[in-house]
Structure formats: C-alpha cells, structure tokens
Image: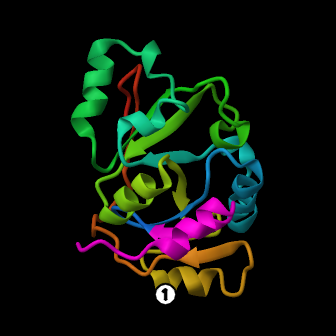
Amino acid sequence: MAKLDLSTALAALRSEAVIAYPTESVFGLGCDPDCDSAIQSILDLKQRPAHKGLILIAANIEQLQNYADFSSLTALQLEKIENTWPGPFTWVVPVQKTLSKLVSGDFDSVAVRVSDHPVVQQLCTEFAKPIISTSANLSGLEACTDAEQVKAMFVDNPLLAHTVEAAVSGLDNPSQIHHAITGERLR
C-alpha cells in the first residue's frame, strides 16, 4: 500500500480529537493515550463503560514501553509476544503505574498490539507513539468494517473528528487476545 496522506488524521490526534481508522479486521476508534479528555470522548462516542479498559496499538514495541511494563515479564514471555508482532495479536501485560485508568479500566494490566496494518504503522510512526484502539461501533453493535459504515453509525457526531478512507486488511476475525503471563487465550 502506498503511503497515504494522513495529515488530517494526525492533526486530529494532535488536537486531542478522536479518529476512525482501519485495522486488520475492523475499523478502530483512536486518540492520544495520554489525553484523558480524548479517551473520555471515545468512551462517550461508543457508549462504553470506562471499567472495561481499552487497547493500545503501536508501530513497534518501543512505542509501548511507557504504557506497558514489559520488564515484569520473563524472557520467554517477551519472546512469545515479539514472535507474534507485528500482526493481529493483542497481549494483556502488566501496566505502567502512570497509565490512565481510562485506558486500563479496572485492571492492573493493559492490552497492547503492534499492528502490521500499513495505516496503523504510518499513523503511529508519524504520531511517534501508540494510539487507543477500540472497535468503531456503539457498544453491543457489530464493528464497522469500512469507512462508510463508520460514517453511517456516527453520523454527524461531533466527537468523531476524522475517518481515514482506507481498507481493513481483510481478516475475518478481530485480533486474538492472550494473557502474557498465563498464556491463556482470552479471545
């Protein structure tokens, strides 16, 4: 995929707004993970309770270091994670104590993923950090799989600043979620 002009999406992220963007299987809603007001906008947009927590998506593992405590994992646990990235594998890892509870919810862990989707790679590289990643849908409804569905679901909602016009990678199912310490598959 050729490099897209993501300047509008990046401007929205930098101005603490919410964007919609394609991932491996569905569209995601994202924002700056260091901005509680933007995170709250995502929760309000989705009508999702904060206690559930959210996923962070990144271009590389280094971008996640300030959010997830990889140092508390064994070398084998970390190797398992690194062997699945970049790709559609989300890992639940211990959280850095500075992470907003709006991201981690009621947990002492955070779900993180290094995506291989070119739009996510470009967004996170140019934004120079991870972004929030939660499915683009109202809680309880099917996740949107294209930009038109996003626009229809959130029609005229001022909380959604921009939708990236690009395709999902085409995977049929959302990313797998595994617990980094126990190895248990959660989804």
Residue on which the image places disc 1 = 148
At 65% from the left and 75% from the top, the residue drawn is 161
Colouring mode (rainbow / by chain / secondary structure / one colour): rainbow
Task: Tell me the SS state at disc 1.
Answer: helix
Q: Is residue 186 left or right of residue 3?
A: right
Q: Is residue 88 left or right of residue 50?
A: left
Query: Which amino acid type corresponds to the residue marked 1 in the rendered image?
Result: Glu
At 40% from the left and 76% from the top, the residue drawn is 5
Residue 162 seen in render: yes
Q: Is residue 17 left or right of residue 143?
A: right
- Relative image position of residue 20 (x, y in whole percent): 54, 70
Quarter where residue 31 is shown: bottom right
- Relative image position of residue 70 (x, y in whole percent): 44, 22
- The mark total stands at 1
At 40% from the left and 53% from the top, the residue drawn is 125
Find out whether residue 16 is within the magenta segment. Answer: yes
Find out whether residue 15 is within the magenta segment. Answer: yes
Residue 186 seen in render: no
Quarter where residue 91 is shown: top left
At 74% from the left and 61% from the top, the residue drawn is 41
- Relative image position of residue 80 (x, y in whole percent): 26, 27
- The quadrant of the rendering that contains the N terminus is bottom left
| Magenta segment boundaries in residue numbering | 1-21
- The quadrant of the rendering that contains the C terminus is top left
